Structures are given as structure tokens and as C-alpha cells.
Amino acid sequence: MPSARTLFVCQNCGYASPRWLGRCPECGTWNQFVEEKAPDKDVKGPSGPMPEAVPLDGPLLDKDVRRPTGLLELDRALGGGLVAGSVTLLGGEPGAGKSTLALQLSALYPGAGEKALYVAGEESPQQVQMRAKRIGIVHPHILVLGTSRVEDVQRVWEVQAPSLVVVDSIQTLASGDFSSPPGSVGQVRAVGARLIQQAKESHVPLFLIGHINKEGLLAGPKVLEHAVDTVLYFEGERHGVQRIVRASKNRFGPVGEIGCFEMGEGGLREVANPSAWFLSDFEQGSWQSGMAVTAAAEGSRPLLVEVQALLVTARYGPGRRTVSGFDPNRLALLLAVLERRLGWPLTQEDAFLKVVGGLKVEEPAMDLAVALALASAYVQQPFPRDWAAFGEVGLGGEVRPVARAEARVKEAGRLGFRKVLLPAANARELKGIGEPELLPVQHLQEALSFSRLSSRRSRRETQEKL
């Protein structure tokens, strides 16, 4: 009897090879090939009853009803709630609070007489129960299933008929049809396909939890992200309390929406006023050089966040660039603009930039505030504490307009900021706004003049004079 044909599949990108390879020719990673059973070429065609094709204006529209989860911030990221039969994939670093969020969702989503099925592949039911008691959500309608076999999940799903299914995590489940270990490309693809099909057929929302690899992406094949309806990322510093749920894909709502949570001993607490939340330390701490506040737009919500910059003379060779929460390429661009257009020698400076609170913001509207924070750190003069700034900076130093300027300005005024530096083109559209005062700028040099950062002697000049 001939042996089953096997393939070697890259665990990073899914590339298949008839033999083992040390380096994947598709994604370039090393030692990622795992032997898996090849699909049978003699598989017969589909059998069983003919499926029914439903008209576009038929009963399908009645089944896809959006339902709130009970967590307003999660609903915001999802676009209003969970849709019947939808599949949501939640990814995040270990310890971020993914399992805690899934437990709270399981407690709040089911209605009267409904049940939630929580599949614990990483922990035992006793461990899940201990966490549930700690955060105070022990409810009889939450059914915990400790298994790593997808067949067991499907059988319990059919018998219990829950209103919500949570799988923690998708990389721990395996199918008996494959000999490869759980978490491999073949297993994740097969398990995901079976669970997604059952969710669509039963019209029950499915919530999958996935691991994050060292590159910050969801572990497993990229095809899993293409198969699900919504992809959420759990962001935030592991040792901090801020947590951000960001939608990177959503077939039922806008992309880029975020939900803000605070991690505590009693679980995740929703944050209704995230701008004040991100600026809480700003009110209490000392305001120094290298700090600026900007109005960022995350989805439909404007957020005020603090940007901190630090410049230190490099001891050896060219300066380093260390960034947290911002695009490193944009930081390099802004440093080049400051050096070329303003004549500031920043090549020999180690530049450190951080967005406070663990938030990751990469939109171009952050440019002006980042440039002002760098300028403030260079001349060692604080940027005005009750000012905010936003705008895109071009390679010529010009300040370009950005979208949703009115919402940004109103958010700054709501939190008591007196003045806002913004692109002149945006200021012309907002002439009717009384407070805060608008300071339109067309070039980065104008913004520095308004904030009195261009007439100060630099740190290096001061040291040389001494």
C-alpha cells in the first residue's frame, strides 16, 4: 500500500515544497518548514443535498442582525456589535488581556435563556474558573470546554446550541485529519475553515483568539485573516494599564476604529473619555522641553495624545533613532527636514521619540507635533503647555492640510487647550470657531516662531559657549 504523500509547509507564509528547505524562498525566514500530509488528489466531488440559493432580498437579510456585546468600547471597534454568523479574530501579545476580554464578552453577550461556549485550549476549566472568580463574572450560562480537538468543539456546539462561541486560542486546536502539530499552517487552516463554516451555518457569532509572533503579526497563515470577517488587535504596554482594541479589518463596519480599556484587578474597564485618559499624567507631571500635544484621529474618534522627544549627543558614529508608537521612517523624514530646511545639525544626535500611553499612531497629522517636540528638545525650551498642534509636514517644510480638522479642534477646546497650531488651509475652513484660538501656519518655520522655539540657542551652542 503506498504511503501518504507529504509536503513541507512554511509556518510563516504557507509556502509548500516537496522537500524540506532551510530558508523559505517566499518569505525568507529560516527553519520554518514542517512536514504535513498533502491533500488527496482523488477526492470526490461534493455530495449530499443541493444547497438552496436564497434571493438577495430574501430571509438572509433578516438573519444578519447586529447585536451589542455589552461592552460599548468593543462595540465601537466592531462597528456596533456582533453580526449573526460573523467570525472575529482577536490578536495580541501574551498578558495583554485577550482572555479576560473574551470572558467578559461571554458574560455580557448572551441574553435570557442563552448560553456562551468558551473553548479553553490553553488552560484547564479550573484555571478559567479561577480567573472568572477573580474578575467577578462567574455565571451559569458560560459553558467551559477544555479540549484541543476541533471535533469535540463541533459536537458540543451542535448539542448545546450556544448564542456565542469563544475559542482561546485557535493555535491550540487540532484536527484528526492532519498529523502535523497544533498551530501549524495546515492545522490552523483546517480548524479555522471547519469552525467558520459551522458559524455561518448556525448563524452564531464566533470569537477566535490568536497569538502574536515576534514581528507583531497574527501567528499562523495569512489566509486565516482573509477568511474571517473582522480582525482586532489588542495593543498596549504589557506593564501598563492602557489597552486599545483596534479593528484592522471589518466587513460589517469601518476600519481603524478603536476601543479604550483600562486593565485592573477586576478585569477590563471601559474608558469613556480617552483623551483625558491619555493626558492624565500630563496634568500631574512636570512639563518639560521635548513635549507636545497633538490631536490624532483614530477612526471616528479624535484623541489628544502627548508626544515626547529626547535628543542626546551621539558618542560614536551617526545618531540612533528609537521610536515607540510612531513610524520610524517618518521620524527620519522629520529629522531630515529640520536639518536641511532649518540648518540644525541633527545627524550626530541620538533621537528618542515616544507616544505616551502605549498608543500607536502613524497618521501624517502627527508630523507637526513631532517636529515641534524635536525642536523643543533641541533648543531646550518647553513648548506651551496649553497648546496643541496637528498637520502634515512635507519635505520642503511646508505644513499640509489634514482630514477632520474641525473634530480635532473641538476636542482640544473641550479639554481646555487655549491655542491650536494647524495648517492654514484647514484654518480657513474653521473661521467660525471661537475657542480655542487658531494659529494657522504654512511652514514649519512659522510654527516654531509662534511657539518661540526658533530664537533660542541650541544645547550644543550653549555647551560650546561654556
Image: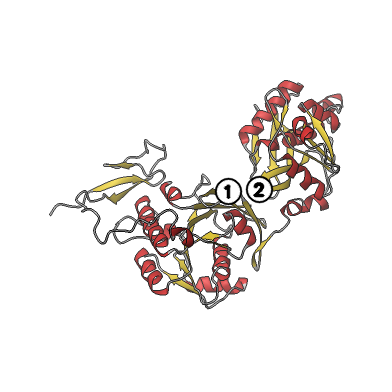
Q: Is residue 234 above or below residue 456?
A: below
Picture coordinates of residue 338 (x, y %)?
A: 73, 26
Residue 300 badge: 2
Residue 377, image quadrant:
top right
Q: Is residue 209 above or below residue 365?
A: below
Residue 187, image quadrant:
bottom left
- Labelled pair 2, 1 in contact (Cβ < 8 Å): yes
Q: Residue furthest left?
A: 1
Picture coordinates of residue 137 (x, y %)?
A: 59, 73
- Mark 1 falls on what kind of element? loop
Q: Mark 2 or mark 1: which comes first in sequence?
A: 1
Q: Is residue 152 left or right of residue 290?
A: left
Residue 177, image quadrant:
bottom left
Q: Quadrant of the N terminus?
A: bottom left
Residue 337 badge: none
The residue closer to the viewer here, 384 or 183, is 384
Tag 1 residue? 254
Picture coordinates of residue 144 (x, y %)?
A: 47, 72
Q: How many marks?
A: 2
Picture coordinates of residue 284 (x, y %)?
A: 82, 53
- Mark 2 falls on what kind of element? loop
Q: Is residue 17 left or right of residue 221?
A: left
The residue closer to the viewer here, 59 or 257, is 59
User: Could one spot residue 314 in this view of the protein?
Assistant: no
Q: Residues within 10 Å of mark 1 (few under 14, many from 20)?
A: some
The residue lying at 61 percent from left, 72 percent from top is 134
- Tell me the amino acid under the disc marked 2: Ser
- Tell me the amino acid under the disc marked 1: Pro
